[in-house]
Image (cartoon, grey):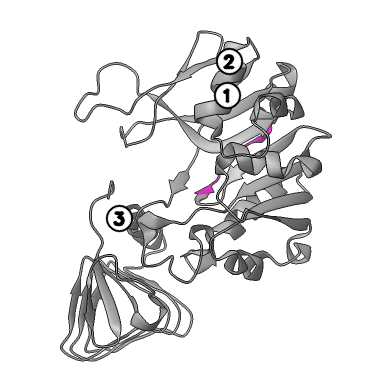
């Protein structure tokens, strides 16, 4: 089976962590997100995988190489301009048009069993099967409405804050099984989104777009707040207070709580770091207090979009989940 990993986005909501890498190359517990995605599709039989690239594509190439280390073949689809999810599929069509294939978003970590979804896709001869979850926390993910037979009817708005009447709404996980027949509905050679342009067109034409409701852990890392929260929750399951990357050091006289340290970070004696993310090579000097912030070396930043300089560091507020 073949697969495609979507990895071309700018990752603007994870800025400034995405100054020197694309979002799928951001590490989660020390491993790039895109590696989790590749290992996931490989576990369900994908041995030929295409990954689309745009912003900082070399960071993904560095993480995956040619796929040999993961027991598969990885090739890359370069986008000079962002093409959207539909346009990305169109560009990769020569590699994907001979059989059904898996598509996953490169910013998620999950243990959802995809085998039942693949089986349902084949049994129902679907043009597309979207893996859905119940949005039990009513987070800011678009609602997917299905009919009684499990066919997707439309992509609706977002859950209303504080409104939790009835069953939890369904949301799209970014995991899907697609038939090559879907290419009939993808505009050729231009930008398009599958949920806005492609799937609605197929549904309107009476083609079966199946909503496969699954269960399992699913972590989505599109905002700084969500990335930090998921990282600390995962660390807690391992009995740890922080995520500490390779080569990083916390002085015994420093205070570091519920924070993520990437590689080669140093937190000196007397420094305080709470609820923060420290990028590669950051040094927090004695007496400095970092709270609810993301910190990177200023030398990697081309344009300061928010936050302020602190010596050779850029310190930016993490902000809410929906920033």
Label 1 or label 3, whichever lies nearer to me, is 1
Q: CA distance from mark 1 to mark 3?
A: 30 Å
Give the structural element (helix, strand or loop) at label 1: helix
Question: Does the magenta run of residues contain 115?
Answer: yes
Left or right: 1, with 223 as reference point: right
Give the structural element (helix, strand or loop) at label 3: helix
Please give the label number shown on residue 267: none
Q: CA distance from mark 2 to mark 1?
A: 6 Å
Q: Which residue is mark 1?
A: 199
Please give the range of residues in magenta.
109-116
For image coordinates 56% across by 35% down, the residue present is 192
Question: Does the magenta run of residues contain 44?
Answer: no
Residue 214: x and y in percent read: 53, 30
Which image quarter: residue 171? top left
Structural crowding at the residue carrying mark 2, measured as other residues with C-alpha within 10 Å and reported as few (<14), some (14–19) or many (≥20) = some
Residue 275: x and y in percent read: 24, 66
Left or right: 209, with 304 as reference point: right
Structural crowding at the residue carrying mark 1, measured as other residues with C-alpha within 10 Å and reported as few (<14), some (14–19) or many (≥20) = many
Pointer 1 or 3: first along the chain = 1
Q: Which residue is mark 2?
A: 203
Left or right: 148, with 181 as reference point: left
Q: Which residue is mark 3?
A: 225
When the figure is inspected, residue 13 is found, relative to residue 104, above or below; the finding is below
């Amino acid at each position: 089976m073949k697969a495609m990993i979507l990895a071309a986005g700018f990752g603007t909501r994870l800025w400034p962590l995405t100054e020197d890498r694309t979002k799928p190359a951001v590490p989660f517990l020390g491993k790039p997100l895109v590696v989790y995605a590749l290992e996931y599709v490989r576990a369900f039989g994908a041995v030929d995988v295409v990954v689309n690239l745009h912003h900082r594509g070399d960071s993904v190439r560095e993480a995956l190489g040619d796929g040999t280390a993961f027991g598969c073949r990885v090739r890359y689809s370069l986008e000079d301009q962002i093409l959207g999810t539909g346009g990305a599929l169109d560009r990769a069509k020569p590699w994907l048009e001979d059989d059904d294939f898996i598509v996953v978003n490169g910013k998620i970590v999950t243990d959802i069993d995809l085998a039942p979804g693949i089986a349902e896709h084949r049994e129902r001869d679907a043009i597309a099967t979207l893996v859905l979850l119940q949005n039990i926390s009513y987070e800011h993910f678009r609602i997917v409405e299905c009919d009684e037979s499990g066919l997707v009817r439309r992509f609706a708005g977002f859950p209303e804050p504080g409104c939790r009447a009835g069953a939890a709404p369904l949301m799209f996980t970014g995991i899907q099984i697609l038939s090559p027949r879907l290419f009939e509905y993808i505009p050729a050679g231009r930008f398009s989104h599958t949920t806005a342009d492609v799937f609605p067109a197929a549904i309107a034409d009476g083609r079966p777009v199946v909503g496969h409701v699954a269960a399992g852990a699913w972590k989505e890392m599109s905002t700084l707040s969500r990335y930090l929260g998921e990282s600390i929750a995962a660390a807690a399951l391992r009995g740890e207070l922080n995520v500490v990357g390779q080569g990083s050091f916390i002085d015994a006289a420093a205070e570091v709580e519920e924070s993520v340290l990437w590689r080669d970070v140093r937190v000196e004696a007397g420094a305080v770091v709470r609820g923060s993310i420290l990028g590669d090579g950051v040094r927090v000097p004695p007496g400095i207090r970092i709270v609810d912030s993301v910190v990177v070396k200023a030398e990697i930043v081309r344009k300061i979009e928010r936050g302020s300089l602190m010596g050779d560091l850029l310190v930016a507020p993490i902000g809410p989940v929906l920033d």
